[in-house]
Image (tube, helix red, strand yellow):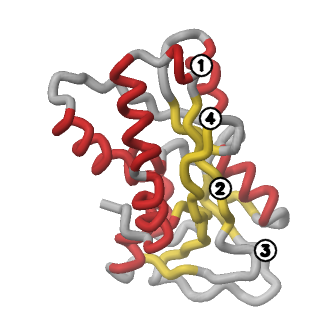
Amino acid sequence: ATACTYLLPQLLARFRKRYPGVVFFLREAFTGELSAALAAGELDLAIVSGDQGEPWVRDELIVVRSARDEQPRRGAAPRFVTFPDGSATRALLAEHFPGAEIVMELSGIAAVKTSVRAGIGMALLSRAAVARDLRLGRFVERRSRRTPVMRPLSLLHRGVERLPPAAAALRELLLERREETQRLITRGAAAV
């Protein structure tokens, strides 16, 4: 979700200027689903969480809470809104916050952010996804020694030589703009 919503739009706009005749078919899904679709030949190129593909960028995940909420009591188990089992973010939450109480599972990033704004719980989310909410004062970052959690994002394909021309050109653009995209992630400036 982070790549489709927060990282790709500017890059795809740049790509469309170079190749105006190319039509995109984007699929937003968990890493396992994208890997299976790629293996089945349904996709040519995927951006996935983890390091199983060609390294692209490293996403920064931080814990945020509603600015209207009081700071949780010291020693209390943190209450989290998160994604279902099978998502990379959920796995990272379990790994880095093993005592977290899951109070709500949602499958979309917009729904998670809306629930955090409403005060239902905190969330471990990409800095790129919450940058605007932080700037507008709707979210507060809950800093800890466990954050930021660095999550590699990789380009997954069945081999460079097997990419169709449009997918090969997109891969080249993504790699060409890797450092710029990483700076945007780190500054939290990739968010729309």
Question: Does residue 94 sit above or below 1 in this rendering?
Answer: below
Neighbours of disc 1 within 10 Å: few (<14), some (14-19), many (20+): some
**Labels 4 & 2 near each other (Cβ < 8 A):** no
Q: Is residue 144 or residue 82 the one in the foreground?
A: 144
- Is residue 12 left or right of 184 when viewed as pictured? left
**Labels 3 & 4 near each other (Cβ < 8 A):** no
Q: Secondary structure at mark 3?
A: loop
What residue is rendered at 75% in x and 63% in y?
101
Please give the residue where the numbered disc 1 appears in the rendered image.
Answer: 158
Please give the residue where the numbered disc 3 appears in the rendered image.
Answer: 77
Kind of residue at disc 4:
Thr
Mark closer to the chain start, 4 or 2:
4
* Residue 174 image-quadrant placement: top left
Please give the residue where the numbered disc 2 appears in the rendered image.
Answer: 151
Q: Is residue 108 or residue 185 the one in the foreground?
A: 185
Please give the residue where the numbered disc 4 appears in the rendered image.
Answer: 31
How far is disc 4 from disc 2 in space, using C-alphas? Answer: 13 Å
The C terminus: image quadrant: bottom left
Given this view, does label 4 or label 2 mark the residue nearer the observer? 2
Kind of residue at disc 3:
Ala
Q: Which x, y percent locates residue 135? A: 35, 79
